[in-house]
Image (spheres, rainbow, N blue to C red):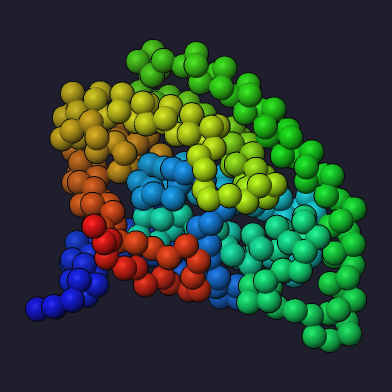
Amino acid sequence: MPTDGRTGTLAVLRASDGPPDPAYPTVTPPDPVYPGQTRAPLPRPLDDVATASVWSRLALPLERALAELWQSLALRASGRPSRWVAIHYGRIALNAHAWERVRARRLGESPDPELVEPAASVTARAADLFERTSARLRGRQLDQRVARAEHARTALFRRIAEIAPEDLDAGELARGPLDERAWTDVAVAALGARLAQPGDGDADPGLRAALELEQRCSLELGARLATRGVLDSPELAFHLTVPERIRAVLEGTSHWSEIAAARQERVEQFAKLEVPRDFFGRPRPDPEIH
């Protein structure tokens, strides 16, 4: 039997993980070239454990948001990571190389050499100088993209205020009231704000409002699926991905409750761990200290 808290907690995780769950993995394989990852740019409540529902909703919009910031500055394609966003023990993380490169280029600073390898050869230094100059000239385009996202967020607030989950049909609840474009704008605005004012993870109002609406819709969907006997309790809807929720509505089978309950148990274990803010590869979590 393990005697220390770290080993004991991880042993429980391994025992409860069961077979691999690609829709909601315990850990994401790191980018093979740029393995550094960071949770620092993500505002609250994304510094907490993300359920399967939140992960499936935000993984692609966060990836697209970071890629759009990269493209706005015309950063070199050769430096693009193959994995922009990851999840480890329920915590979402961004590729640290990509974030640091966007941040440094936008602010005209030298990037952290541990995350962005300094140019060594004459050719590489020339390419680096060209990228820095290009990024400085295109900084306005990045600012304009963030401004468009913030404008869209203002309209989103009005839209959220008008949405009543109880008035939506089950299919709309399963798909979610906000489409992928709206979520991408929310993510661009949130990350853009962190570029301008690197803080301590203060909550982003647009992100919080969107997530609160998502939670209300999840509970409404869960209540309907529980009434139909598909889920054992409404809260289990938080532990199904968007495609799984759609299938649960269409199929009406009860095996979704077993899948969601297993994930709920994993989330409870994830909440006992502290995941580093910055790390390379797969993080080694620490037991939470009370």
Depth order, front residue of 193/78? 193
The image quadrant where one finds the N terminus is bottom left
| Vertical side of 197 occupied by 133: above or below | below
In this orientation, which residue lies closer to the viewer: 236 or 128? 128
Observer able to see residue 70: yes
Provide residue 3's location: percent of width, then percent of height: 13, 78
Residue 254 image offset from top left, x and y in percent = 18, 38
Which residue appears farthest toward the left when viewing the image?
Answer: 1
**Residue 14 sits in quarter:** bottom left
**Residue drawn at (64%, 59%) of the image:** 99
Q: Quadrant of the C terminus?
A: bottom left
**Image location (x, y in percent) of residue 9:** 21, 67
Q: Is residue 173 above or below residue 68?
A: above
Q: Is residue 262 visible?
A: no
Q: Residue at x 38, y 19 (%)?
A: 165
Residue 106 position, x and y percent, is: 77, 55
| Rendered view: 227 above or below 203 | above
Q: Quadrant of residue 232?
A: top left
Left or right relative to 79: residue 131: right
* Front-most of residues 275 and 54: 275
Position of 129 compared to 53: left or right? Answer: right
Quadrant of residue 130 within the rendered picture: bottom right
Q: Residue furthest bottom?
A: 121
In this rendering, the answer to whether 183 lies above or below 224 is below
